Image (spheres, rainbow, N blue to C red):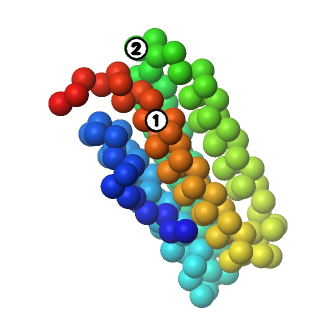
Amino acid sequence: MAFEWKERYRLGIEEVDKQHRKLFEIGARAYELALLDNAFDRYDDIMAVLQELLDYAQYHFSYEEDFMRKHNFEDLPNHTKEHNYFVAKVKSLLAREREIDEEQEQTLQEIADFLSEWVSTHIMFVDRKYTTLFPKS
Ligand SMILES: [Fe+2]
Ligand SMILES: [Fe+2]
């Protein structure tokens, strides 16, 4: 599975869609690095991109949570739990250094698959819920 934006991820909220696209852009860079023949030499680059993905995801999650808090949105606790799960998971993946070092290609692909799958599912089923808070344009 590639890490790429698809039209069905669009929620129709400009700022949120922009941030989601950016998450996919960063993810795609990690994925491409992981698939290179010389991924071994790219170890530091790959970890740096995964860290960047984590940082940007945290920024994006705060943006969404602030928005939902401002509107007293009932799904906030559940939504925050999902975000926290992802952050903890990516942190634990980044800590699997030795494994990544030894089984690079397979491990990195697994990581990229997980990230891509989680982000797309989250957007379509969890983020979509708060779109009711945005006035239709
Ligand atoms: Fe999101
Ligand atoms: Fe979210």
Viewer-closest of 130 and 38: 130
User: Residue at left 57%, top 79%?
Assistant: 35
Measured as percent of width and height from the top left, residue 96 is found at 78, 59
Measured as percent of width and height from the top left, residue 84 is found at 64, 34
User: Residue at left 46%, top 35%?
Assistant: 127
Mark 1, residue position: 127
Mark 1 closeness class: few <14, some 14–19, many ≥20 residues within 10 Å:
some
- Is residue 76 positioned above or below 90 on the image? above
User: Which of the marked residues, 2 or 1, is nearer the chain's N terminus?
Assistant: 2
User: Residue at left 50%, top 68%?
Assistant: 2
Viewer-closest of 127 and 58: 127
Disc 2 vs disc 1: which is toward the camera?
1
> What amino acid does circle 1 point to?
Asp
| Label 1 secondary element | helix
> What amino acid does circle 2 point to?
His
Mark 2, residue position: 71
